[in-house]
Image (tube, helix red, strand yellow):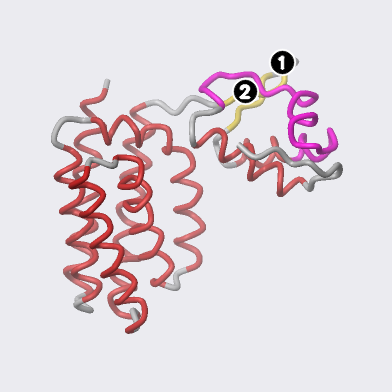
Amino acid sequence: MTTMSVQGASSADVTGQIREAIQTGRYAPHQRLIEADISDQFGASRSAVRNALLTLSSEGLVERMPNKGARVRSVTIDEAVEIAEVRMGLEALCARKAAELVDDDEIASLRRLRADMFAAAESGNHLTYSELKNAVHQSVQQISRHHTAVLLLERLRAQSARHQFRLALHPGRGLDSVHEHAAIIDAVVARDPDAAESAMRVHLAGVIEVLRTLD
């Protein structure tokens, strides 16, 4: 994780750094978040750190404990399932909108993303594949031009990010996932809103099914 080297880092900078650390697992569930330590780490004022923790608390990533400060909130499997269920509705909407609005340049970009995703999956490069898989979702959301849905999805993704690694390791899930993401791309590229919405729902239903088996 990059440490901010300039004193006076903004609250937004610190918020993004802490959010990333939580999403990637560098800050573990239930880990204490001590303002003085974070201030030193990111070169930010205590006030900026305090505001960042308040923002992340409103996003559901941090929980405030009376007289004990803050810690990373642990998202249960049941919560992760609920988040995926909400994501299904929002991402299906984005997929439909993307199929309606996609332009030729975006189609070319999606086709490259599809090819890169299969190449990474076939080579067993799990880290690259995971990044490309996330890029499919982000690309579809961007193409949808639906700013409200995208904002809500970013918050939901942040809360459930820690479960994504476990999903990727589930037996057979990788092969299913690559074809599900390819189907989403194919439907958007074909400018078929019904197929795009359906493909996204099928994918998220698969995520929910696997989540329910984790614990």
Q: What residue is at 80 percent from the left and 24 percent from the top?
A: 36
Residues shaded magenta: 27-51
**Three-letter amino acid code at disc 1?**
Lys
Query: Which circle marks residue 187 in the picture?
Result: none
Residue in the picture at 66% in, 25% down: 64
Q: Quadrant of residue 96?
A: bottom left
Seen from the viewer's position, the closer of residues 147 and 45 is 45
Q: Position of residue 156 (x, y in %)?
A: 45, 45
Residue 202 coordinates in the image, percent (x, y)? 17, 53
- The residue sitting at the bottom extreme is 104
Pick whichever, 119 or 209, lies toward us: 119
Return the mark for residue 71. Answer: 2
Residue at 44%, 53% (x, y): give it.
153
Q: Residue at x 33, y 79 (%)?
A: 102
Quarter in which the C terminus is drawn? top left
Residue 42 spot, x, y in % from top left: 75, 36
Rendered location of residue 137, percent (x, y): 35, 57
Question: Are circles 1 and 2 on residues that touch, CB within 8 Å?
Answer: yes
Left or right for 122, reference 30: left
Q: Amino acid at mark 2?
A: Arg
Q: Is residue 136 above or below residue 8?
A: below
Residue at the disc numbered 1: 68
**Is 131 in the magenta?**
no
Against 51, is 195 above or below?
below
Instruction: State the SS at label 1.
Output: loop
Q: Would you call the spot at circle 2 few (<14 residues within 10 Å), some (14-19), or many (20 or more)?
A: many
Q: How many marks?
A: 2
